Amino acid sequence: MTPVEPPRVSPPQLPPLIALDPGDACDNESFSEALLTWSGEQASLIGADITDSRLARLPSDHLHARRLRLAEVEVTDPSVVTLNAPRSHWRGVVIEGGSIGVLDCSGATWQNVTLQGVRIGYANLREAKLSDVTLTGCRIGTLDLAGATTTRVAVLASLVDDLDARHRTGNHLDLRGLDVVRLNRLEGADSLVGATITDQQARWLGPTLAASLRIGITEEDP
């Protein structure tokens, strides 16, 4: 078996930042070397480009961020009901702390992304391309990886209630830090090819993995 490769992640090295409240209509705008805060409940960043910056406070209700491009960006203690960012591109991004009700990054591309201590109700990463990603100390209701491509992705010391991995592809998916005791539902166990789990996790997940392969388990001897 090929040893699991850890994600190649590194935090942004940010320059001195200029404080800015960009307002609620920022579609297709560009921001660089900025400390961004939003005072309203909603904002739109559709097609925007943010580099070498820190997002210190997100809109409290809804952030429309389809096709948002983030490069070398820190997001600190977000508190937002919905972060809607399908088909976005994130590179060198760290999200630390806070709470996100719905994180929709379906069809997104993530490279060198770290989520640290974030609470997420529903993380929609369907058909996303995830490369060098870590989820550390996170609490996630549903982690939806259906159709995603994962390369060097690690789940560390995290709780996930429901995991959907149907039609996931990729290599070096490290699930050894996933608390499987708290895992209520696992869909697509047969798509966990290339994943690494511990012996204890394998024993706990045995019935689920067997069911996905249509293997019957009985306590009766032949």
Image: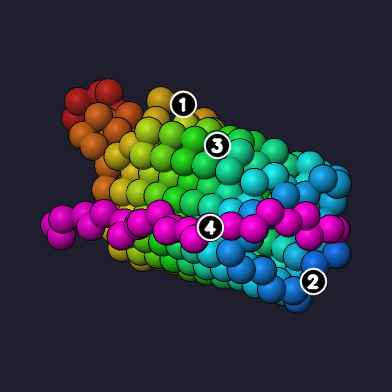
Task: Assess whether mark 4 and mark 3 are in contact (beta carbons under 8 angstroms).
Answer: no
Mark closer to the chain start, 2 or 4: 4
Task: Point out the tag, 3 or 1, that comes first from the N-terminus.
Answer: 3
Give the labeled residue for mark 3: 97
Q: Which mark is residue 27?
A: 2
How far is disc 2 from disc 1 in space, using C-alphas? 40 Å
- What amino acid does circle 1 point to? Arg
Q: Earlier in the sequence, mark 3 or mark 2?
A: 2
> Label 4: how many residues lie within 10 Å, few (<14), some (14-19) or many (20+)?
few
Sequence-wise, the earlier of marks 4 and 1 is 4
The quarter of the picture where residue 151 lies is bottom left
Residue 108: x and y in percent read 58, 67
How far apart are the alpha carbons under marks 4 and 1?
42 Å
- Most foreground residue, 18 or 63: 18
Residue 192 in the magenta stretch? The answer is no
Numbered tag placed on residue 16 in the rendering = 4
Vertical arrangement, residue 191 with respect to residue 119, above or below: below
Quarter of the figure with the N terminus: bottom left
Q: Nearer the viewer, residue 118 or 209?
A: 118
Residue beneath disc 1: 182
Q: Amino acid at mark 2?
A: Asp
In the structure shown, which secondary structural element does the residue marked by tag 4 occupy? loop
Which circle's residue, 2 or 1, is located before the other in the chain? 2
Q: Which residue appears at 68% of the width and 54% of the height? A: 19
Numbered disc in front, either 2 or 4: 4
Magenta span covers which residues? Answer: 1-24
Disc 1: CA contacts within 10 A as few (<14), some (14-19) or many (>=20) = few
